Amino acid sequence: MTKRNSNSDIKRKNKAAILRELIRAGEATKPELAFSLHLSLPTVGQIVAELIEAGVVEENGRAVSVGGRRPVSVRVAPGKWLALGINITANHVSFSLVDLNGAVIAHRRSKLHFRMGREYHQELMERLDDLLRENHADRDSLLGVGVVFPGIVTPDHKILLTSHALRIEEPTRFEYDKSFSCPVYYFNDATAACMVECYGDDAPDSFLFLSLSNTVGGAMVINKSIVTGTHNRSGELGHVCVIPGGRQCYCGQRGHYDAYGAAWLLAERAEGDLSRFFAMVEEGVPEMCAALEEYLDMLALLIYNSIALSDLPMILGGYVGNYLGPHLPRLKEKTARLDIFGQSDPDIRLCRCKYEAAATGSAKFFLEQFIESVAQREVRLEAVR
């Protein structure tokens, strides 16, 4: 590698690091950035000036002085660079509009029964346009759109190969590419939700992710990268067989964990309201408490099998994961009882994103891509609104 290329690579890494640190901290002065990233103040000053010139970063007033002139605080320009996630399920659609700071500008979930055809697409886009208008944005203002499905997608994120939940058995490409001027990628729902954890600065480098929604999915992360597998099907924990010949899974096979761990199994006990189910558990309603104990028993079995295979921490997400905080100690206890190695405190954690994680994760994918593109550019960027 030439010295010129080496210097260019170092600058790219430094620029990305400064931008990520500003996103993490919210705002910072140049001396604070230099200290936290172990960079020289002139290097930070030059890169911050370029980011301000590009319109990605802006000054945010003066910080408190510790002696002498008060330093200027800078931040990522809020609400300026936006990406969108769309999560499609059999009975609902969710939108998540995210800015470069990682803040969810808006999210919305509503009932919409999935069906093939132009009518469904048109209704979905009308709901999306309403959300964008309410937040002073439009389709042309987006850096990218992630469309999330409960199914398997191609490695290039352009085709949905199959989805048992949506009853799609043949490779399918939808019309979303034609509806936006920005890139549009397809994602598996559990993989998209897992990306929220990957982009966090306090997540383990390697872990398993389990999404406990109305369908159960998962993902494996090794050294901050999601493992896709030979056929892009890695992490399908919902289709791990836990009870041979047991309940029928929606895929047609029997005994898969999805038939015991899907969120709707708990929600249906409370007239379809998962929050009401857990409220009734807190109230001590015997029937609900017994149902949760059975649920935790099966969840502990899957977690133990997964940890025994991988020896990795487990992060729980999805609809049910949002409510498991008070019950995490008991889940750990149940898992520990199965552990032949005598681990008394298995590494089981809860997800960081509590609402619309799949839609949010697919949107953040494009923001991560944007950060890398900014780090590589030397030319002025035009702000997108």
Image (cartoon, rainbow, N blue to C red):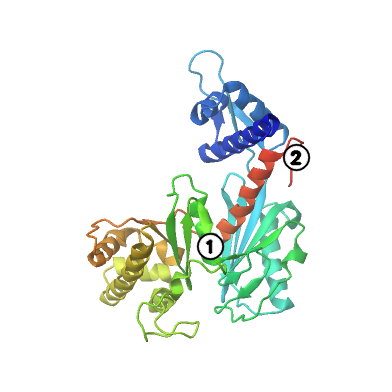
Q: Is residue 185 left or right of residue 251?
A: right
Seen at 58% across and 71% down, the residue is: 152
Q: Taking 153 as reference, is 19 above or below it? A: above
Mark number, residue 381: 2
In the picture as drawn, the residue positioned furthest to the front comes out as 1
Mark 1 touches mark 2? (CB < 8 Å)? no
Instruction: Quote the CA–CA distance across marks 1 and 2.
Output: 31 Å
Reading the image, the residue beneath label 1 is: 191
Badge 1: how crowded within 10 Å, few (<14), some, or many (20+)? Answer: many
Q: Is residue 233 left or right of residue 141?
A: left
Badge 2: how crowded within 10 Å, few (<14), some, or many (20+)? Answer: few
Q: Is residue 334 left or right of residue 255?
A: left
Residue 385, position as x, y percentages in the image: 73, 47
Q: Secondary structure at mark 2?
A: loop
Residue 83, position as x, y percentages in the image: 65, 53
Q: Nearer the viewer, residue 179 or 239?
A: 239
- Residue 120: name its quadrant: bottom right
Note whether residue 31 is visible.
yes
Q: Nearer the viewer, residue 270 or 35?
A: 35
Seen at 63% across and 74% down, the residue is: 161
Residue kind at label 2, given as amino acid type? Leu
Q: Nearer the viewer, residue 311 or 97?
A: 311
The mark that comes first in sequence, 1 or 2, is 1
Q: Is residue 360 left or right of residue 131?
A: left
Q: Nearer the viewer, mark 1 or mark 2?
A: 1
Residue kind at label 1, given as amino acid type? Thr
Q: Secondary structure at mark 1?
A: helix
Q: Taking 95 as reference, is 55 above or below it? A: above
Note whether residue 79 is visible.
no
Mark number, residue 36: none
